Amino acid sequence: MPSNEQRRAAAKRKLERQLANRAERARKRKQLTIAASALGVVVAVAAGVGIYFLARGDDSSTTTASETPEASLASAPPSAKPKAELVNCTYRDTPDQPASRPVDKPRTEGIKTTGGDATLSVSMDTSQGPIGLTLNNAESPCTTNSFASLAAQKFFDGTSCHRLVTGGIKVLQCGDPTGTGTGGPGYSYDNEYPTDQYEPGDMAAQTPVDYKRGVIAMANGGPNQDGTGTNGSQFFLVYGDSQLPPQYTIFGTIDEKGLETLDKVAAGGDDGSLDPNPGGGKPNLAVTINSVQID
């Protein structure tokens, strides 16, 4: 039977391994800001509840969402709560991640959520075909405001969509001028719908919901230590129903022509360069965003 000293030493070694693993995961998350991949989701069970950690893991083995019973129980995100007619937004500088292209921050005050400004039409011209978007100010005004500002400053023009995932989740990720998954606009901001429909600490906020075919959502690297969000410029286009924790701001929908374009890209597959974590790789049919126009 091991002595108390031996047990303490073993516990210390285990803790050191856990801390080292967590530090390595944090480093990788900084290097690659991603939308969660079902291929890279790790399931940790606490008190019988499935908790999904994105862009990070625990100290056990990985499990794809499609293999877990919890994933099959995913439901629609909760209905959005009405927002004030005018909202203010906060966009924080990210000194450790300077802007990949020179860009001004979006305006921060008096963002409308109702009336004629409740939605915004966007035309995205890509090398593989057009992708029309309708952005939803009523649900995610600060996200829509940021996207429109970046589009107007031509931040997205000439950039590549650097990640396609065809297994587990079905998304095309874009919005990084560096094409590496590490770039951004030099600022960050908090999640909106559906994250803001949950109370802080609500375990339901870790349970997968359905990100339906045809929605557009923001990619992020998980919350900062102070709980603030890490949204920047990267976004993902969902071309097939996908189950993800509600930690990715949904801010619009994709038109039918755009879904046809995405289906074509998805049919071409990816190069697998990001497997197993975070999953997927560069699309074999390269996608370059030629321009993004506010209609």
Image (cartoon, rainbow, N blue to C red):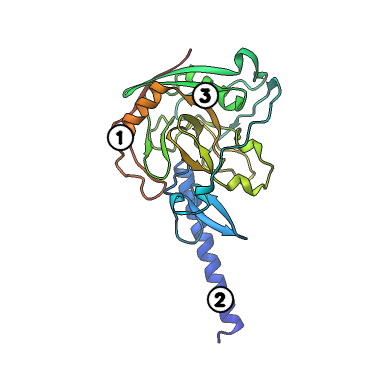
Closer to the eye: label 2 or 1: 1
Q: Residue at x 52, y 39 (%)?
A: 210
Residue 267 — which label?
1
| Outermost right residue | 84
| 80 relative to 202, above or below | above
Residue 147 — which label?
3
Q: Residues within 10 Å of mark 1 (few under 14, many from 20)?
A: few
Q: Earlier in the sequence, mark 2 or mark 3?
A: 2
Secondary element at tag 3? helix
Secondary element at tag 1? helix
From where the camera sits, is residue 35 visible?
no
Q: Amino acid at mark 3?
A: Phe
Q: Amino acid at mark 2?
A: Ala
Q: Earlier in the sequence, mark 1 or mark 3?
A: 3
Q: Earlier in the sequence, mark 2 or mark 1?
A: 2
Q: Is residue 269 left or right of residue 71?
A: left
| 80 relative to 167, above or below | above
| Residue at mark 2 | 9
Spatial CA span between label 1 and label 3: 27 Å
Point out residue 105 in the picture as x, y percentages from the top left corner: 56, 24
Q: Residue at x 42, y 46 (%)?
A: 278
Q: Residues within 10 Å of mark 3 (few under 14, many from 20)?
A: many
Point out residue 168 in the picture as x, y percentages from the top left corner: 41, 45
